[in-house]
Every structure is written in structure tokens, then in C-alpha cells.
Image: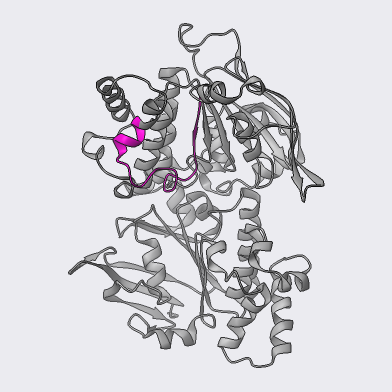
Amino acid sequence: MSTPLLSVENLSVAYQEADRYARVTHDVSFTVEPGEVVALVGESGSGKTTTAQAVIGLLPENGRIEHGAIRLNGEDIAHWTGKRFDAIRGRQISLIPQDPTSSLNPVKTVGAQVGEILRIHGERDSKAIAARAIELLARVGLSDPELRARQYPHELSGGMKQRVLIAIAIALKPQLIIADEPTSALDVTVQRRILDLIDELRRDTGTAVLLVTHDLGVAADRADRIVVLQGGRIQEAGAARQLLAAPQSAYARQLLADAPSLSAGTRAARSPYPAAVIPASEDAILVENLVHDFQIDGRKSFRAVDDISFAVRRGTTHAIVGESGSGKTTTVRDLVGFGRPTSGRISIAGTDIASLKGDALRQFRQKIQLVYQNPFSSLDPRQTVFSIVEEPLRNFGRLDAAARADKVNVLLERVGLPEALRQRRPRALSGGQRQRVAIARALVLDPEVVVLDEAVSALDVTVQAQILKLLDELQRERGLTYLFVSHDLAVVRQISDTVSVLQNGRQVETGPVAEVFRNPQSPYTRELIDAIPGQRSPANV
């Protein structure tokens, strides 16, 4: 019987908290064979990243391996020093980190950073290093690699930066690549290209991949075997097709049920809202021929939004989808009154935004509220949960203190935040709890329209499912109209009634979600739909 490339045996890792160590993984065991893709799947706090960090010797200073073995080609490396790990990092094991922006040095050129791994492992010929760096950049599919080698990270897109990190990871043809959420911050089409590239390189070189991800759709498409982690313990492990077709653990079944990319269905048709709640006289949002130009260097202009039109019926959800640079953010800023379009008309709840200025514009913003993508940065860290939700009522002079308290408490209860959390500050909450606070803050003024700007993209799949369920319930109860901005078409397919697809500032398709997904007319829309992960899964076959 051959020796596995990697064997993790009963691994338990702990982190120091004050004067004691708290264990975060418990007897984790799995193997990776040469050329195989094994996915570690789980939510935040499941132990998947800690396990990967232990394998490559990059645990934080307050972390330690309490017991267990990590065998690379049969040799236990679990307690190696940093110096010993330096000899194998890059050569035998490489890492593709999650965030390409923070993982590259902003003051070094791309070529110098690719070449650095070669220097670390003994190459001294500067010309040979420069030539090899260009060769690697070409290998990972970057156009004009000679130019890219001279550029700095800020001059590249997110997908291009991730390709640079892959070039560094494959430079010395390692036996094992650890890919830690390598595409979680990328648009769906860029994600597919990056994952295709990793697959291609794996086939060409025989490199194995340990894929760390919270996206079961990605694991379904790319992994040979899946290891499901929860609370630092393995809940289930096995061949990907078998596990996905018939999960044995309750947790794995829940992950599958909550993963939008593994559900092929669109939002079910719903019964009409009560007439008393939803007036039928007008659309909640009407956008006609929207154009927005930005001045560049005071002379030239750049057209970010080019003749976009759509209408959103009251009480429904309209999605705006597209990759980075498609015009989504500019459109949203114009809708909520943060930007002034060059031309066109925007009407919210029957009010023409262009006619509003000063205090009238400020008062109008009570009708339309915004929930941002990142609940970690959109809440004031100095305020308590209660104060954060109460603040809009104070700002608009609504109600006396007792009435404000009643309204805030009722709303916090409705979004699932118990009384025990209300005097805590955001840092003491989980990501899902923070987003519930952000939703409560948006709803406290009783708006008619809520704009959700990538509002669930930073959340784990089970938390995401809980927030989407909450949003649907609140829409039914309050007759809310949602504008849902997202690059995740799997979520859009699940929760939206209608959709507009943007590309390079233009609307290439719009219509009912079921119709657009079933019969897309634009090649770009077809490309976006084809890139949704999880479509190779037994669940969708």
C-alpha cells in the first residue's frame, strides 16, 4: 500500500487565551493522495483554516499543536521549526491565500514578487529569475506578461492578482498546493477561470490540492473527496459524489440544503400581498434611460452607466447582477441619492429624485434604506446594538425616548436578536448577528424600498440562508421592495423575482428571473449562468 502524500492524524490545535489554551480542532484525520483534490468544507470557526495553517507550519504565534501527526511523504512535520519549514515551503508545499490584495507587497513589482520565491530557494542569476517570472505569469494566463512583470499590484484586477499568487505557488512545482478560499472574493466568471487554471496546472504537473472553502458548490465541482468540519471536528468525509448524493450527517445535509448553488430552482411564485399593504398604483422603483459619466483628469469622461432602464413592482425583489466594473455600484449610488446621474430619470415610491435637494433629499432617504456588504465595517464599533438601531430615529426626530425604545426592541426581537445582545458592541457579535443589526437599522424608519448591496456575500452558507429567510419574511410582513445587488447568481436565482444583467455599464438583459435563467438571450448572461458553481454536482445532474 503506497504512502499518502499528506496524512493528517488525530490533529488537535489550541490557541492561547489569557493564561490557558482553548482547543479549536479535535482529532482531525484525513489523507491527500498525489494529484488528488481534497476539500475541507465548513463554516467560519469550523477549524478548516487552522488545519491548513498547521499543515504548512503557519499557525499564529498563540497557536500550538497539542497532539497528532502531520506526515508529508511519511515524515512527521507537525513540530518542525520555522526554519525547517522554510526549506519545503514553495518547493514541496505551497499556499494560495484568500485575499490577493493583502497578500502581495504593494511596493514591489509583480515580477520581483514572483522571482522572490526562486531567490529564496537558491537561484542567483537575475536574468534567469526575470525570464522565469515572465514565463510563470504567461503560464497562469496573464496577458502581456512582460508588462505585468513591471506593474505593481494596485495596477491589476482582483483576478489578475490571484493569478500572480498562483504563479508564485507553482513556481517550484510543489507536490501539494493549499488553496485557502482562493476565489471567495472574485466574480463568478473570474472564479471559474481561476479554478479551471488550478485544475489544468494540477493535471499538467500532478500536484495535489487541499482546497479550503465554505462554498459547497465549489467543492462539489472540483474535489475528489470532501471532509466536512464543524466546531473543529470532522462530521463526515468521503468521495465527493457519494457524500453529495447521500450525506450521512445532519450537518452535511444542512450545508447541502442551504447552498444556493446546489439548488437549481428559481423563486417560487407567491400569492399576492394584501391590497391594504401594497398599493397597485405605481412601481416602487422606476429607472429610465439612466446615464452616469465620470470626469477623468478634468477633460475626458468615462461612461460608467449607459442607458439603463428597469421597473420594480412594489413588494417584489429585483436583482442587479454583473461583474466588477459592470455599473452596479454607480447605479445603486444614484438610486439612493448619493450620486447625481448625467441624464435619465429615477423615481422611488413616486418621487423623482432629481427634483430633491437639501432637506427634502435628506427626508426622502427615510423611504429608501441601504444594507451594505460588510457588517464588520458598516456598524459603529463604539455604539451598542440598541444605539445603532435607535440612531436613525434620533436623527429624524422620530418619537420620544420611550416610544423609540419600544420600536427598537420590537424590531430587534423580530430580526432574531435576543435581549442579552442589545447592550453589546459589534465586535462581540458574529457576522450573521451583525448583519441582522444592519437590517434592523435599515428597517427602523419603515422604508418602502431597501437596497441590499452584496448583503449576504460575506456570510457562511448557513448564516446566509438564515438572513435570506429573514428578508423574505420581512418582505411578506411589511410589503417591502428589495433591490438586490449581487455577483452571486445562485443567490439571485433563489430569492429574486426579476433581474437586470449589466456588462460594462450597459444592460444586456432584463426580465423575470425564471425566464432569464431558463432561456438567456445574451451570451454574457449565458456565461454568468454557466459559471455558477455546483452544476457538476449529483444534486444538479
| Quadrant of res 147 | bottom right
Depth check, front residue: 245 or 497: 497
The quadrant the N terminus occupies is bottom left
The residues colored magenta run 368-390
Which residue is at 40% across, 74% downward?
58
User: Which residue is found at the position 38% from the left and 59% from the top?
Assistant: 237
512 vs 381, nearest the viewer: 381
Magenta highlight on residue 385? yes
**Is any part of residue 206 visible from this angle?**
no
- Residue beneath the point at 36% across and 36% down: 437
Residue 197 within the magenta-colored segment of the rendering: no
- The percent position of residue 18, horizontal first and vertical second, equals 20, 66
Q: Residue furthest front?
A: 358
In this picture, is 57 found above or below 292?
Answer: below
Q: Position of residue 536 (x, y in %)?
A: 58, 49
The x and y percentages for residue 405 are: 27, 25
Specify the farthest residue to the left. 19
The residue at the point 64 percent across, 32 percent down is 334
In this figure, what is the number of numbered marks?
0
Q: Camera-side residue: 333 or 45?
A: 333
> In the shown orientation, is residue 334 left or right of residue 478?
right
Q: Residue furthest right?
A: 299
Q: Is residue 225 above or below residue 61?
A: above
Whether residue 229 is visible, yes or no, is yes
